[in-house]
Amino acid sequence: MADTVPPKPTACLALADGTIFYGTGFGATGETVAELCFNTAMTGYQEIMTDPSYAGQIVTFTFPHIGNTGVTPEDDETADPVAAGMVVKWDPTQSSNWRATEELKTWLTRTGRIAIGGLDTRRLTRAIRQQGAPHVALAHDPDGNFDIEALVAKAREWSGLEGLDLAKDVTCAQSYRWDEMRWAWPDGYNCQNAPKHKVVAIDYGAKRNILRCLASAGCDVTVLPASATAEDVLAHTPDGVFLSNGPGDPAATGAYAVPMIKQILDTTDLPMFGICLGHQMLALALGGKTVKMNHGHHGANHPVKENATGKVEITSMNHGFAVDGQSLPDGVEETHVSLFDGSNCGIRISDRPVYSVQHHPEASPGPQDSFYLFERFSEAMDARKSA
């Protein structure tokens, strides 16, 4: 019996240090250069790929079964995938989900995202943990023709996320209203018809489910672009201000976001709530600092402790930068910490309803461990009106 010839690789992942991984390509063809991270979530790959916070990153999924729930427009966090690419261990499985409207492979092809399967994702994840998130080039060619030297050179030449303002690339082009609430059986998404509060949400790359949680907490939400000024915000006479998640280096986005936040804090007593990049923006505005993490936090199983109560929440996280808890000034409290590495996960002003968290309370990994944060925002607006 003749020896079988192994199939020719149709995709290649080249790391800046010269390490090469070959596999099977799916999705769009071509090349892309980005930072490589890993995500430990067992499901929610569509939400991860469409999370604007993943701009400039290729996601390695540590869970091997990717594709089995298919995709549905209801689960998009924004209109199209934002993550630059996808890395998986096994070829995506066929979808088996009554909600699915499209296969993962078809969706990636249609939306122009490159993916590679058949890699040893454990080895790749260990390398990311030990060496830090590398710069990589990902290529997909059905004929298997790759210029390896050129791919490695592109990975080495890429400037990386430090100093990069990506919020401007993923923010909305103009303001809009949002009233859709969280998904609920059996009707799906309903609209908030009796809002109690007017909230302005600054879009640094806002996930739709965050806006849904605000609506479910009784908010009439107006979304403004990341470049909005304090005058733009206050022109809507809001009862509270929300700072959204987003990608890139917080110090770069802070060049225009921090002055706006400072002006609102200095001239009003409005409650303010931030998540992820919004958390980092608030910390910078209050005098704190941010740092680039070795490999970041990406997953749906991150334990976070609330310092005031000792309660531990299982949270979803997606960030490569973190607030330096040691840099917080007097009057600003550290409210939450990661039980994985002790990094900062929340802050608040001691005597004002202004607070933020690094994790994603809207992502429901607990599944409802952190929903109280939205209710706390609503209660702060109630209290201000009563006073």
Image (cartoon, rainbow, N blue to C red):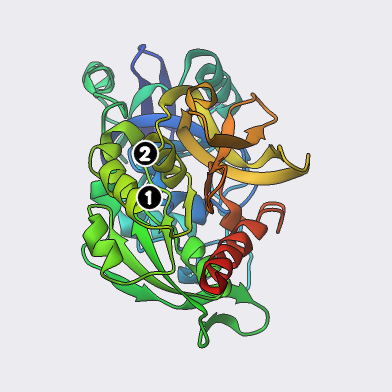
Q: Tell me where residue 87 appears, x and y as whole percent.
A: 47, 37
Above or below, 195 against 48 in this view is below
Q: Tell me where residue 319 appears, x and y as whole percent.
A: 48, 37
Q: Tell me where residue 204 appears, x and y as whole percent.
A: 34, 51
* SS class, disc 1: helix
Circles 2 and 1 in contact, beta carbons < 8 Å: yes
Q: Judge the density around disc 2: few (<14), some (14-19), many (≥20) Cα neighbours within 10 Å.
A: some
* SS class, disc 2: helix
- For the residue pair 316 and 359, the one nearer the viewer reads as 359
Above or below, 173 against 98 in this view is above
Which residue position is annotated with label 1? Answer: 265
**269 sits to left or right of 91:** left
Q: Find the distance from the CA under tag 2 to the CA under tag 1.
A: 9 Å
Q: Quadrant of the N terminus?
A: top right
Res. 128 in view = yes
Q: Tell me where residue 340 appears, x and y as whole percent.
A: 67, 27
